[in-house]
Image (cartoon, rainbow, N blue to C red):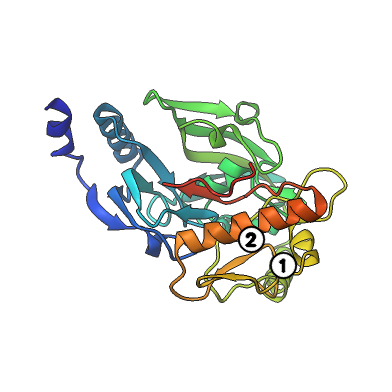
Amino acid sequence: MAIMAILDAPPTGVRENVRLAPFTTWQVGGPARYFLEPTRSEEIEAAVRWASAAGLPWRTIGRGSNLLVADAGFPGLVIRLANQFAAVSVAPAGDHAIITAQAGLNCALFVMAGINAGYGGLEPLVGVPGTVGGAIAMNASAHGKAVSEGFLDGRVLTPAGAVETWEASAFAFRYRHSRLHDEAAVFLEGRWRLAAVDKAEAKARVMALQKWRNEKQPTNVPSGGSTFRNPEGEHPSAGALIEAIGAKGLKRGNAEVSEKHANFILNRGGATAADINGLIIELQRRVFEKYGVKLRPEVVGLGLTVGELG
């Protein structure tokens, strides 16, 4: 009865039965039992305390890239940080600056905030389709540059409900991974050191990177971003392996392997999470059978397990 009383009185701003598909780049997925779009860290803390006390599972999401939500949805609380929880500031200090960004800030806006103030170094991340928080959680990288480079520290809400400041080393960054990938902690905001740059040159680099992305990757059809991590060792990239097995254009339901870049799975309209996950499993199976390589999904699941080979 006590749990039911708590469930009947969620914190202010928490909504019930909110469809998640519009909040993912794949545009698929069922409803969250509870849903919050906070603007202040205090709202996040209150919602997490409430969910934990009620025995509800909870998760944070950003723009919903690299995220596959189950068709049945998620039976707990989803906290969406994108757009609203997205403040950024740049503090110059001679030949460098400290940029502070909240978790919900779009990665492209994060990069441009530094450049517009005359500081940079993370330009390749302009093409990462998610938010700063998601990028930190998976240590996102592009063109050899990882979001953990220049990272100083971050404020984190721990599973116990305490807000702590972690030094960069505490995040245990490695390729496409951080400590946040393994434990229920929420990245709230972080600080990076940026170097002074020529604005015009930095903006030219950004434009060139965006042009490359538009030419090489499908950007006008709903997708989850890169589906698989690149295998470790001397193996070809995940995209090259999928292309080598002749899987470009392979379909399951309305999900399709991109003809433009084989490591992208597209929603051709009306695809379900089951369609996409089935295609992911099929690609894993075919690559393993031919090359003995286990493709590991870069995509994470909400309400389901992505893939089957681990």
288 lies above or below 172: below
Residue at disc 2, secondary structure: helix
* Location of residue 179 in the rendering, given as x and y in whole percent from the top left corner: 58, 31
Of the pair 21 and 205, the residue shown nearer to us: 21
* Location of residue 56 in the rendering, given as x and y in whole percent from the top left corner: 30, 35
Residue at 35% x, 52% y is 73
Residue denoted by label 1:
209
Say few, some or many: other residues with alpha carbon within 10 Å of mark 1 (under 14 / 14 to 19 / 20 or more): some
Left or right side of 1 for 248? right
Residue type at mark 1? Leu
Residue denoted by label 2:
126
User: Quick one: quadrant of the N terminus?
Assistant: top left
Q: Which mark is residue 23?
A: none
Left or right side of 67 for 197? right
Q: Quadrant of residue 31?
A: bottom left
Residue at disc 1, secondary structure: helix
* Dot 2 or dot 1, earlier in sequence: 2
* Location of residue 69 in the rendering, given as x and y in whole percent from the top left corner: 43, 54
Residue type at mark 2? Val
